[in-house]
Image (cartoon, helix red, strand yellow):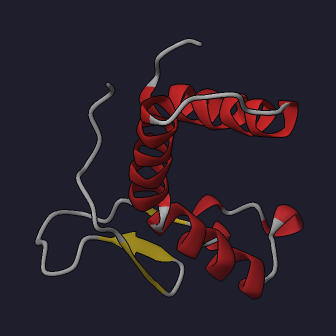
Amino acid sequence: MSKYTPGPWIAVGWMVEIANDKKPDICTTNQHQFDQGYLRRSMSEQLANARLIAAAPDLLEALQAMTEAFLDTEGSHGSVESDAMDKAYDAIARATGDNP
């Protein structure tokens, strides 16, 4: 598994941070930082992106728990469940840096 700053992460405006941490922020979605005025996203989109990024550690943990539970109860599952599990495994691989 790849190493990343442990969660929980929080969105504070367009910044993604760790609460009560004195280290620099995880990231920013504020495009003013990049001085690309003609490419800027709306403020609401920047804030939504920060919330999504802040949820990343929790989403990864939930997917890992879901796939483990699926393996523990694997029986005869239809193609819908199989497709969903393939997407979950692919997302976990992308997040952890493990190639599927």
Instruction: Say which residue appears at 13% left-offset and 72% top-offset.
Output: 21
In the rendered structure, the answer to whether residue 20 lies left or right of residue 73 reads: left
In the rendered structure, the answer to whether residue 49 lies left or right of residue 99 reads: right
The answer to which image quadrant residue 32 occupies is: bottom right
The tally of labels here is 0
Instruction: Say which residue appears at 43% left-offset and 29% top-offset.
Output: 96
Relative height, residue 32 to residue 74 (above, below): below
Position of residue 24 measured from the top left corner of the image (x, y, whole percent): 24, 63
Instruction: Say which residue appears at 13% left-offset and 81% top-offset.
Output: 20
Instruction: Pick whichever, 3 or 70, lies toward us.
Output: 70
Position of residue 28 measured from the top left corner of the image (x, y, whole percent): 50, 66
In the rendered structure, the answer to whether residue 61 lies left or right of residue 33 reads: left
In the rendered structure, the answer to whether residue 56 lies left or right of residue 77 reads: left
Position of residue 59 measured from the top left corner of the image (x, y, whole percent): 49, 56
Position of residue 25 measured from the top left corner of the image (x, y, whole percent): 31, 65
The answer to which image quadrant residue 45 occupies is: bottom right
Relative height, residue 82 to residue 44 (above, below): above
Task: Tell me the quadrant of the picture where the C terminus can be found.
Answer: top right
The answer to which image quadrant residue 43 occupies is: bottom right
